[in-house]
Amino acid sequence: AFQENEIKLLTAEIERLKNSGCLGVSPSLEGLRDENAKLKYRLNFLQKSLQEERSKTARSMININSCLQEIFGAAIQAAYPDLENPPLVVTPSQQPKFGDYQCNSAMGITQILLKTKEQKVSPREIAEKISKNIPANGCIEKVEIAGPGFINVHLRKDFVSKQLSSLLVNGVQPPAIGKRKKVVVDFSSPNIAKEMHVGHLRSTIIGESMCRLFEFAGYDVLRLNHLGDWGTQFGMLIAHLQDKFPDYLTVSPPIGDLQAFYKESKRRFDTEEEFKKRAYQCVVLLQSKNPDFIKAWELICDVSRKEFQKIYNCLDITLIERGESFYHEMMKDIVKEFEDKGFVQVDDGRKIVFVPGFPVPLTIMKSDGGYTYDTSDLAALKHRLCEEKADILIYVVDSGQSVHLQTVFAAGQMIGWYDPKVTRVAHAAFGVVLGEDKKKFKTRSGDTVRLIDLLEEGLKRAMDKLKDKERDKVLTPEELKAAQTSVAFGCIKYADLSHNRLNDYVFSFDKMLDDRGNTAAYLLYAFTRIRAIARLANIDEQMLQKAAREEVLILDHEKEWKLGKCILRFPEILQKILEDLLLHTLCDYLYELATTFTEFYDNCYCVEKDRQSGQIVKVNMWRLLLCEAAATVMAKGFDILGIKPVQRM
């Protein structure tokens, strides 16, 4: 609408310049000719981009809930033009007898009329008035008023059938989002010289999935790994490196176990006074960019990177490394900016900043002149907002950091780096991983569980499960290996993502590998089963595509209708997650889709066979198309969750 309006204005402006007789009349009016050329160029550009946007919108899946909200929004506006921001509540119906969707706004409007206008009107009367003002549209078959004032909405079958056909022809296309926004996601963020442990699992899996969702929805996504790659701990690591591998500058040190190396240096730091002094000197030389110390730092970082990458490769994680060291040079400017604006107080030699509403101040400079996590987090926030020009900034960090991050965000707002009405800065917090004893997940010896050990255990257990089911007798070695990887890593990811991230969750291989209930094992099996239906009927992809363009999807059976509607709810599920960042909603939806499909398959023959010979007698192509639509949506759901399904399992 904005582009169409601008095209009208530009066209009118070009006409004005023509009519004024100024175009191409004399050299003194060169500027006007340039202006006309610019206007025409802008007009052509806008018309082209509008055509592209319309084409993209035509292919996009329609968010039926949003569609109905627009329709009922217009009806409420027509029925009650004086009401400001009336409640607009449209939800899918829980039972078929209540239609397909419900508009439950009447009760809220009753309360508003009573409070603001002192009018006592029954919700049912309001519902009737709204119903009478529903504008002409292509998706509603009929509405019924039920109970105290619920408006039950019945969708048109031809509308649902057409949307399913569009999905089959165009694939799963994201709903149109308007202007392409930039999203920066900070996730994973392990510390150099320390191994990734189970605590990093949630940030890594949740962050990756969020990035995939925003990318699918058409946003420009920057995936950042805020590594702990700078700070005083590097002094002791470098000092220990010098002692253990004195020729490290010329011969690459064979540091096999960086965790053990870290523990050795920490023990020496805590027990040897001379070593401790030298460690502090190493920090000073590192921060002053001494080449030998930078080389030592890079060596240590590289060993860690290789270990991290093994895990990222297993879990199919993509990140751009931008650790604390990246922001080091910016920190003095951060301190100066807060000083110049009068926000800094000095407390016992420290420079601190109090943020209104937060009792604990941020320490932006220590008494010895060093910087802190507060300083680097502020520098990172500013860079992402002011240099990267993020419209949306998401920190996937554990709940324990909540107060710290909210204080940093508030400080950025206070100093004027962003306006929360324009830029969204969010902490996507998550709870801890618990063992089956409901305590923090540890090894039997009480150590933190190494992430690489966990993944290897997952692979072993997945293979055991597949062999228990005698899959090794029907799958080729390559297929068995693919199924093992898919099940192992898919189950670990899904077990995390299927829980509300705000809660702690219990890590249990037995539960996550169970092929019953809401697990990846069940969904992966359901998916391969759906994909096999057409294959076993000798229907290939080309035949399905041809049928999708030519066949009308009949939705006469109640289970066909239920499955068709469930498939088309996918865009509204994604829209909800883009707003609240709670990915378990997608897992719940995929489980609902799989169980709805099972109901459909148990009641509706897709392929009919002769009972004696087993020969195919009839293929109900519209039902195979419903199978294909369900599988296509499931595949995209898996892709967003970072799960790789297999054709045979």
Image (cartoon, rainbow, N blue to C red):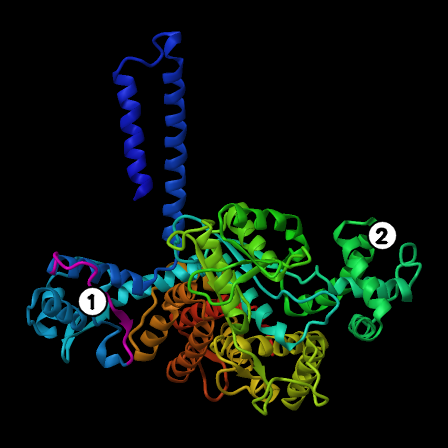
Label 2 neighbour load within 10 Å: few <14, some 14-19, many 20+: few
* Coordinates of residue 56 in the picture (x, y in percent): 40, 50
CA gap, disc 1 to disc 2?
Answer: 76 Å
For the question of whether residue 212 can be seen, the reply is no
Most frequent secondary structure within the magenta stretch: loop
Residue kind at label 2, given as amino acid type: Asp
Residue in the picture at 17% in, 73% down = 107
* Residue sitting farthest toward the top: 26
The mark found on residue 13 in the picture is: none
Q: Which residues are drawn in magenta?
A: 80-94
Q: Secondary structure at mark 1?
A: strand
Q: Is residue 242 one of those drawn in magenta?
A: no
Q: Where is the C terminus found, in terms of image quarters?
A: bottom right
Circle 1 sits on which residue?
141
Q: Is residue 82 one of those drawn in magenta?
A: yes
Circle 2 sits on which residue?
292
Q: Quadrant of residue 145?
A: bottom left
Q: Secondary structure at mark 2?
A: helix
* Residue sitting farthest toward the front: 348
